[in-house]
Image (cartoon, rainbow, N blue to C red):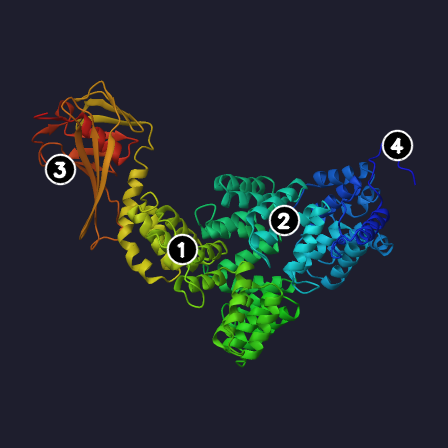
Amino acid sequence: MSTPPGSPQPVAPLRARLSLRAALGGLAVILGLATLPAAVHAAWPDGYEGRVAHMNALRQDFAYTGVSLENAAQKALYDKACQLKSSTACSYASWFGPSGGDLQKAADFYSPKCNSGDPQACTLVAISLTRDDNNNFQAKDARRAFSLYEKTCTTKAYAPACAGMAELMMRGQGTSKDYTSALKRAEEACKAEDPYGCHLAGEIYLGGLGTKVDTVKALSNFKNACKGSVPHACLQAAVVEAQSGAAKDPAKAIATFTKFCEQDKFTAACYQLAKAYEDGRLVERSYEKAEGYYKKTCDVGDIEGCFGLARLYEDGKVESAAGAEQAVSIYDKACNAGNNDACARLGRLYIKGKGVAKDVQVGVGFINRACEAKDADSCDVLGQLYESGNGVDMNLTKAGEYYDQACKAGIGRACFHLAKLYQLGKGVNQDLTTAGKLFDKACASGHGASCSKLAAGYMSGEGVPKDLKKAAELLDKGCTSGDGDGCVKLGGMYAEGKGVTKDLAKSSGYYDTACRNESGMGCYYLAKAYEKGEGVQQDFKMAVQAYKDGCRVKYEQACTEGGTVMFQAKFQEILDRAWESKICQVWTIVPGKDDSTKLVADVRGDQFNLLEGPFKGQTLAPQKVGVDFEKEKKFRGITKWAVPGPNGPVNFRHFDVWDSEDDPIDAFPGDLSRSPDRQGATNLVYNRGEEVVQRNAEPDKCVFPNKAPMLTTEHCSELQALLAAQLVSTCKGE
């Protein structure tokens, strides 16, 4: 058939390409070269622009969770494919209406074409078997979907079908969970220029799923997928760029997520915002904000958002009277929609009796159901139940079998559990060599605790030559993979210079990562670093937050020692907002004499324009020269300031007091803030409520202009008011 004039010229048709591949394979054998790998199925890019554009339109309409394009925008995608000679795309009115695309109508339209062998039609039918009306993954008939993907990928070399295979392998739906095979299929699809294949490969490398964590490869794949209009990949690229590499820019990532979420109504971006606030990696942690964004995604039918919300409630990270019950309801809905992880979590809640009447048998049933559906994570959970005898009769042999099944499917945590059985000889013959290999396999797959377990041997010299440098490398790998305790140990090595060059900045960085990974000890040491200014700028507010985080995860030292820093944090807030006002004015006032009011200082931030007093006509910027704390029954925070004078610097102080025994910390700061006179025993006292400054006794050596008894202020912070009062006061002997 001839190509219509003016249409894009395709590359060799599919049959010709397959023949070419066979010919190349035969030629390689003749020449004695390695043949093309048998596993490669989507080796050639789709040469038909219209079909590529049509696949993108279908995915935007039906496959991408959280994408809700306006009808006009979605139609434009189909029209573009139609213009590029995809005749099927021109028929989109068959399934597209006022409410957007109808997945079932699309499946009905494409089924006959699939029966005739059209690869794109079979891919759409497979999508319809694994998605609900909101584009959420729902395993309605995952086995048939996988069969369609597999046949279309292996016999038609159609890259989107290979990507579909990869996704089901990653989820363990319709086939066994197999990250290694999923990565092969995803990379095949990506090489054949299918952007969703690139996205899936990026997810595997980013999560270390069955392979080593590799953020460089993850970012490269996400960027390729983003260019191919996969919106989730664009978001993930922003995450990776914000957290790794030389040019970290968390604020840019958060701005990107916020724009996509608030303006473009892309709920996957709202989900990313929720995760960011929950993890505290890109922005200051806020479980309340995380809850809000998870709700935003859940309310429009995004199961992932509902699942994230349930985790918050289950873990008690947000205050909710019915939190656990809500988690049960959400997990139940997600489980029925085919989310096996939700089934396993629901089972654990039944076993604990959390949010639902305790029923161990039902709980084990949910977990067993997920395992039988080839969800390897759930098989690992079953192994833990048999190992502990929780809800089932203890059976270490069965535990080992379930761990082995999940480990072979690429679940690093299961390899870790199995390794410990071999290490201790529980249910299996003790075999330290096998245990070591399993720990190594788990570490390579991204299970951080296994890396730290291997590091412990190199730190102690037990079973291997003592090698602190090797230990540090393994701890870094474990920390990167989410093991908080490994981060703490590595932070300690950098703090003491053991096996690595001493570096307090790196030490505090590892403590910070540990804390974000829910290590109470990491939070405690991070708090100490902020409190002392070791490796980080001294910051009492950050210290208090770290103590709170440590206390929340039950690290007792963080609970007991955090209270003593609270005052310092609140005092720091006073300093942080010292120069916020750009329109502070200070006036003399004599009660009962309105005509005595006179402007004596005009303050813009830290610039003091003085209209009266010894510095009249000058604009000065007081310099902070120190901060001290006195901690007894009464806590006292003190700042020291100086301005240049004709006879040398003029020094003065400011202080705030909190009675730690009689007043709750929330009572600080109170109404009064003080500054001792430069001469004599009197104090300048600023009343925050009345916004006036006066002396606490009859002045003996220092007076305000015109001997006014007090100054009144407008729009001033306590420091602006007190320092202005100092600078306009005239003192004897100066």
Distance between the alpha carbons at the discs numbered 4 and 1: 66 Å
Q: Are marks 3 and 2 in contact (CB under 8 Å)?
A: no
Task: Please report whichever mark, 3 or 4, sits nearer to the chain's N-terminal start.
Answer: 4
- Whether the residues at callouts 3 and 1 have beta carbons within 8 Å, the answer is no
Q: Amino acid at mark 3?
A: Asn
Image position, residue 323 (x, y; %): 49, 61
Q: CA distance from mark 2 to mark 1?
A: 39 Å
Left or right: 40 with respect to 733? right
Q: Is residue 536 above or below residue 390?
A: above
Which residue bears the numbered disc 1? Answer: 490
Q: Earlier in the sequence, mark 3 or mark 2?
A: 2
Marks 3 and 4, how far apart in space? Answer: 95 Å
- Give the Cα distance between marks 3 and 2: 63 Å
Q: Are marks 4 and 1 in contact (CB under 8 Å)?
A: no
- Report which quarter residue 239 is drawn in: top right
Q: Secondary structure at mark 3?
A: loop
Mark found first going from the N terminus, 2 or 1: 2
| Other residues around mark 1 within 10 Å, as few (<14) / some (14–19) / many (≥20) | many
Distance Cα–Cα, label 4 vs label 2: 40 Å
Q: CA distance from mark 3 to mark 1?
A: 54 Å
Query: Who's the residue at 54% across and 46% down the image?
Result: 240
Give the camera-side residue of 301 and 677: 677
SS label for mark 2 = loop
Which residue carries the number 4 mark?
5
| Horizontal and vertical percent position of residue 424 | 47, 75
Which disc, if any, is residue 696?
Answer: 3
